[in-house]
Image (cartoon, coloured by chain):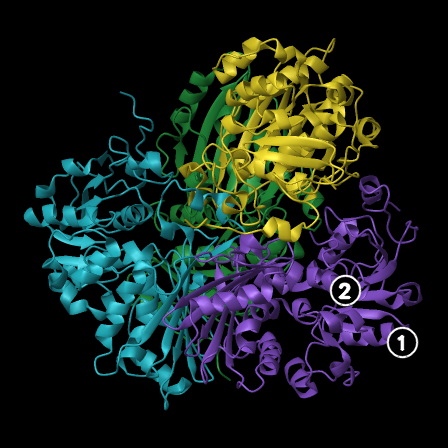
Chain colours: A purple, B cyan, C green, D yellow
């Protein structure tokens, strides 16, 4: 039988660096990727190929087990795909879970039992409240106690915890684009009491995942713009609200309105966020706050006055670009990220780097 | 002299209907189009070709005079383009002005002197306040007194005035997408006192006009999303604020925040509008208000519960689709129009139909 | 149970023209549409709404029966969808079949038994050779004898037969874009003996149909260009080859190479066709041939010297634009059509108009 | 005066690697980039930032001198832009010329006088024939004798010459996508005598350069496909024809027909190339030839049987993907590259690596 694509592309291109099953010199950390054929999974594959101190020991895919990654992605490496059940957990130090919720938690249980540290890209460990989890995700959690133990890996605001964590829950793509810009003003108590914060977010289509759905058919998406799940009805609303409440101690949690929109581009998120300011807060004070908060961050870019964040600032990078505008007592934050990088696999690698003592920016610049 | 495209496409396709210089049977109204080669101008050409009771006597273009429309647009009719100065105003009943501001007002002066009724697609007659006009448009107005006389042609809310008007100012594209959904709730006094109304609007690229600018280069736009002029700094903010204030008598004018964004699609606007509701207003009361306001309108579609407006609802049509969502005391209106049709030339034709006693939907269905 | 979208949009917009179940004045022909929710089916719905002398009595959809068209398409009319088996064939004069092959032939059998004339948009009646049909479509044909009787509805070249036909097989989208430009030169014997004709065709994504496939996922298609089925391996190659052979009597049938490509746009086809010319044929002689062949056609546009066909010449219209270039003895034909209009439903309506004695361009301008 | 974007983004992101004006450790080669703000120029900036053994000493831009690169490109480094006339040629070892033709040759004269090696991305040194150059580029060449001396840097076929060259002319984007796949079969004498080779090429919009032209306006490009300069009328035809003739010694030069098309994507080229085969050549023999020619190449990927090249195989990489199909005696080569990488700046870096003894793939994987 002929293999559909029996190539050695990866080996050709990276002669000093090979895939699963062969040894690398100076390898420090061995990892496995669960769910490697989704958009986030493949982005992770792509990033980890640039990481000189990681060996990817296995990649799983339930639907494509038996195939190789280059059969799925034109530029993918010639790496075999195996069933999740066949993953040799005893051979890796850590696992990345790019799985749907519930499947992710179940796999985390297996991985922890094998002693692996877990970097989870699903929603299964993002929330602290079991009640909220069950309300929004409609499943039972196999290890409710781990919700407290897991670290919410919004890296810039959780470095110390991430370093020591055994389970890191990488934030959702929308929450990353909303919480990073909101953190300073909310923590500083700059939000007007009783007012709504509105996050009007726009995402590229890869945010919906690699699914054969009419909703994502090119003809349905192209030349269109589609709001969905607006108000307080999207799961990411619950995730953001919990985090904002946690940051508002003593200030009263602001009410969040969140409106996601699907736009006709493959990747990138732009969130336009409206924050009514408390008296005494003006453009200058806000700017000072943000430059103080993020001035030294390698991935967060506070844009100069008069500049607004655009998808182009962040796409195909781990960057977060933040623009600030104040008008009529309203702070308007524009924030751009790439949903697959900082909003997903890039932040996962950033957290991984912290967990294993690498330079935080390794494989991400 | 050789014409670059000496075709008779239009004549072929519309054997019973020919262009400037030849007679039509049963013609009722003769019109001229100033600025026929821009996107709005050509959309008007396209619409008026379907209007059986209009004769287009001339089309002007300063940059392309001497050419024909089919040299500019692949599907355009073989109609000659002339300089504005050469337009035979004595041969037409009405003129459509698809010109930049200031140029439009100057042409209106000429056209009115020749006895023509004017349908203006520029901003020159949209504002009532001369002071606001001069502040935002940085030019002197040649006929300040006409600002009062001109009718703001948001058709659904100005039918009686439009019918009698000699100058109709067609609303801006963004204002159309914001004011039509806001009118009922603002007029009804349903907006929470002292709160901001936020309009987060997204437009297709044709909204910026047919200009050779790097800003609109395909490579710069594609795969990108760009906010610009957000807060209270876009000219359309001034236009909308004036109209909202006019509708708020006794209720206190709500403060508007307006954030336009450029998206990577050719045409269409989606405005997501956030209106904090006064106590006593809930989803049911809002729905009743809107169905009452727009239930019988031929072009305005109040979407059923749970449905949100998308660009696909309105693109390439004169439709206005309005979705309503209420969450945590916030009314979220989603409104879709086509910026070149209802947001520009379609509404112009709708107004024209009223001015000359045609069925309002003529050439628009 | 609440219908998801209980609107009367269509009735609102077309007060004098209603859908199935109600009567129209002056109706001349009653039709049914099988497969109304695919892209070709809905294009047909869209076109027939503009046809004043047609009543659409029913629309079928196996997957969406029980819903209405406006639940599927944002701008669709509020027409009910029924199962194919429930179609009241006795109430219509003609049926349009927008079905997959095999399903189409089976439905044609039912429709002919009920006395309906059939306009088929599938491949089931396009080929004359039963052997070719079975080889390429891998099914048995229920009425092999109808292959001879059915008329291949490449309208410009089959007017007399179409008028009288009981079964019209509308050509495939690619074949329309290749055969119309090739007909004159092939019939005139201008092709160099023994040479290959090459048709390099590019299609918009709607050409693949409205199917939930990863292949058509926005992220897979956008920013990409994908050849497929090139050489002599696409079913449309067989269709074209049969017709070219038929036109080549005495001249020897040219060998066709056909290379379809999927491009990242929703609709439109551009075929670039390479025809090695027989000695004695030059640009001038070719031009004269084409202007003679198509100069009076309402939908075929022979572009002037130096102009090439682009998708923009034809998209969202029933037009066929043909450009001609001669270089080094090679005639390069560029041909643009809209795959859903002239390449499918537009040509179907054009044929329908001929069959029932309407002006050929009715509802198509 | 405030600088529009006084940021230190680049320094933040690359703490160990800074831009012009500051020293790097272990730097081996100092270079200057002329024309750094065009698409090819910025791609070069992007690639060279990843090259650990290069220092970019200066970047020029006539239109943007005085600004910094991050003011032009959202993800650009904070590097100053200077006028070409101010470039300190005495401080660099080599220069990259991303300039229009004629301007490039003039700058090459200056650079060579200062002892710099020249990597030219323009057309000024690609042709060997002065007559052909003057005919197609309509300018006089300042150093006709250098046409012989310069090396045509189609890297895979000129390694030895590139290593020693003082002037490397990087091939055009289209020629790269056509000549790499054609080289083996043409050199092997596999092309049928007297037959035409047809290259039907499709390019992304960045291929046209970063110019404020209506031709590249998003609205004109999107949803469109436009052939231009087809037959034997594009400058790249002359470039390819000269090279093919050089490879055909004794076999007779095949006549080339070249048809470029503009497609609605930002970057990438797909060339579909039709080669009538000489008797005795079949699919197997062709495959053996190509695997032998390119099997060990780091950037050229000969796709397995049945696979066709797509833009996705090569976009945003220096890869060349080649698919092979044989039908009816015709070899159909599909070849994908990224026009800005292998078709321009990537190949320039590949050549640079050879010239200075670096691993050929440095900064390109």
Q: Marks 1 and 2: same chain?
A: yes
* Residue at point 82%, 54% (across, down): A67
The percent coordinates of residue D316 (x first, y second) are 65, 43
The percent coordinates of residue B357 (x first, y second) are 15, 61
Q: To which residue does mark 1 refer? A: A113
Badge 1: chain ID: A
Which of the 4 image quadrants contains residue B229? bottom left
Q: Nearer the viewer, residue C84 or B247?
A: B247
Q: To which residue does mark 2 refer? A: A354
Query: Real-space Cα distance between discs 1 and 2?
Result: 22 Å
- Pointer 2: residues within 10 angstroms few (<14), some, or many (20+)? many
Left or right? Give the position of C110 relative to C160: right
Q: Nearer the viewer, residue D119 or D196?
A: D119
Q: Nearer the viewer, residue D244 or A63?
A: D244
**Residue A40, labelled with which disc?**
none
Badge 2: chain ID: A
Q: Nearer the viewer, residue A57 or C218?
A: A57
Query: In this rendering, does residue B341 appear at all?
Result: yes
Provide the secondary structure element on which disc 2 rests: helix
Left or right? Give the position of D111 relative to C47: right
Query: In this rendering, does residue C87 appear at all?
Result: no
Comparing marks 1 and 2, which lies closer to the viewer?
Answer: 2
* Residue at point 71%, 19% (across, down): D165
The percent coordinates of residue A172 (x first, y second) are 64, 69
User: Which image quadrant: the C terminus of chain B?
Assistant: bottom left
Which of the 4 image quadrants contains residue A120? bottom right
Which of the 4 image quadrants contains residue C200? top right
């Amino acid at each position: 039988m002929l293999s559909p694509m029996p190539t050695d592309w990866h080996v050709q291109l990276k002669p000093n660096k090979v895939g699963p099953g062969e040894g690398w010199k100076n390898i420090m950390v061995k990892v496995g990727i669960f769910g490697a054929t989704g958009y986030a999974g493949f982005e992770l594959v792509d990033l980890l190929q640039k990481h000189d101190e990681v060996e990817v020991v296995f990649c799983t895919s339930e639907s494509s087990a038996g195939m190789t990654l280059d059969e799925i992605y034109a530029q993918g490496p010639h790496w075999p795909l195996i069933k999740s059940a066949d993953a040799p957990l005893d051979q890796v130090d850590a696992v990345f879970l790019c799985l749907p919720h519930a499947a992710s938690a179940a796999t985390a249980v297996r991985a922890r039992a094998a002693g692996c540290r877990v970097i989870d890209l699903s929603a299964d460990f993002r929330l602290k409240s079991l009640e909220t989890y069950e309300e929004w995700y409609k499943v039972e959690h196999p290890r409710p106690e781990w919700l407290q133990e897991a670290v919410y890996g919004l890296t810039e605001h959780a470095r110390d915890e991430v370093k020591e964590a055994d389970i890191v829950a990488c934030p959702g793509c929308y929450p990353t684009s909303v919480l990073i810009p909101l953190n300073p003003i909310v923590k500083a108590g700059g939000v007007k009491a009783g007012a709504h914060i509105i996050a009007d977010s726009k995402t590229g289509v890869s945010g919906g995942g690699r699914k054969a759905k009419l909703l994502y058919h090119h003809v349905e998406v192209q030349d269109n713009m589609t709001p969905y799940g607006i108000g307080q009805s999207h799961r990411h609303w619950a995730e953001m609200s919990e985090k904002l409440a946690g940051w508002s101690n003593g200030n009263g949690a602001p009410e969040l309105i969140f409106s996601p929109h699907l736009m006709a581009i493959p990747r990138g998120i732009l969130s336009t966020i409206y924050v009514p300011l408390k008296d005494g807060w003006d453009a200058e004070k806000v700017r000072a706050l943000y430059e103080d908060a993020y001035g030294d961050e390698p991935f967060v870019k506070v844009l100069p006055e008069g500049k607004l964040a655009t998808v182009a600032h962040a796409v195909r990078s781990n960057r977060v670009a933040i623009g600030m505008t104040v008008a009529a007592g309203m702070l308007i934050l524009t924030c751009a990220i790439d949903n697959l990088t900082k909003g997903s696999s890039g932040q996962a690698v950033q957290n991984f780097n912290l967990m294993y003592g690498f330079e935080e920016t390794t494989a991400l610049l």
